[in-house]
Image (tube, grey):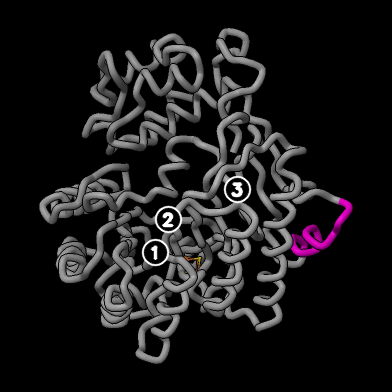
Amino acid sequence: MKFDTVVPDDIINGSEVTYAQGCPITSLYIHVPFCGGKCSYCDFYSIARPDDDAMRMWHRGILLELTRIADEADANQVVLAPLDTIYFGGGTPSYVPPRMISSLIDHARSLFSLTPSCDITLEANPESVDSPLKTRAFGIWRDAGVNRISFGVQSASNQLLLTAGRRHTAEGAAFAVTSAAEAGFRHIAVDLMTGLPGQTMTDIEDTLNFIDSLPVDHVSSYALSIAENTPFYHLWRDSPELFPDDEREREMTHTITHRLQLLGFEHYEISNFAKEGARSRHNLVYWHADPYLAAGPAAASYMAGMRRCNPAGIEEWYALMEDTAGGPFSGSTVEETISEAEACTETILLGLRLMEGVTRERFMQRHGIDFDELFGEKLTSLERRGLVFRNAGCVRLTARGLDFADIVARELV
Ligand code: SF4
């Protein structure tokens, strides 16, 4: 993504090394591009029902990429620190043999070292662990160091799950989440979706009751976004009336927010809710616009002031990892240097996703300038329309701004 900005670099009081270049990296994202099928709304890069060879190739490729990232960090001015978060995302990380996950954690530990409280999250789909035989995976993940599982639950309606092309049932999700807790996982997150075709307020209420019955301490709630060339895109083009309109979708979001707060979840980011001490530490790195490492096909990283994205094709990506002549970043499909001006825009855009917003102190520490000097006029216009709140300490979205966060973002770039 290119961040256009109106802020000339030369008015920013930065040193030669920008904040993003000098900030030590403490987070690693590992992309697992495999799934048991394709959901009706998904346009992410993922291979449905891969064979064993593809998974072995992926595993070997990640080992190579991690080694090369560590080897070349110096040359790329990457300041590495012990990792404080590792996130296995996808795709469906729970789809690959659990021992592959443990060997990658061991490899990362040997290369980068991990902090004693390193948060290691693994995304899982309920169908990977929805029967007693399959739950042996929990023990392997846990013993490898995974301490947080994030389940793609999406809804408690089996009809909606079927429509969305999900491969689990509500009963399977309940079994998976409960089994994770029984296996000793204290941090369990679930994802929900709004805006599904045919979804009603009753479905939302049922899903919230379902969440309330489970041992989860983090909930993410995302509105469906309709991507071209997906089954839902064709359905929407032919029968848009099946999808909740904007007003109904806002009502769903408000209901979820209100109810989760009553259940003791703090609304800490536009789409995220956590019990005390259960915020997603890895995702906070993104919202704070801090740098992070990434490995795997289609994985995006932010290192040494550069945003890069690996090729979205397992064979193309693996060939790059095997090519000892090129660095791990030599074949990135997107490679963009983030100027200090663009970094300022990212800090404000991503920071406004957090309920606490962006503090002046933090912005000044990072960029050596007050955000009002860069964005003052735009913030005043947004403030007049009741979309942002600003005081001596911070700027943040208002309740109305949460509903129109996309407008705020568009006006700030
Ligand atoms: S599980 Fe996730 S990545 Fe896989 S097809 Fe469904 S939405 Fe896409």
Q: Which residues are magenta?
A: 316-325
- Foreground disc of the pair 3, 1: 1
Q: CA distance from mark 3 to mark 2?
A: 15 Å
Overall secondary structure of the magenta section: helix
Image point (19%, 51%), residue name: 265
Task: Classify 286 as above or below 87.
Answer: above
Q: Position of residue 373 (x, y in %)?
A: 44, 9
Along the horizontal axis of the image, is 42 left or right of 357?
right
Q: Which residue is mark 1?
A: 147
- Foreground disc of the pair 3, 2: 2
Identify the image quadrant of residue 394: top left
**In the image, what residue type sits under mark 3?**
Leu
Image point (51%, 78%), residue name: 36
- Name the element at disc 2: strand
Identify the image quadrant of residue 188: bottom left
Tell which residue pokes out farthest to the right in this image. 325
- Name the element at disc 3: strand
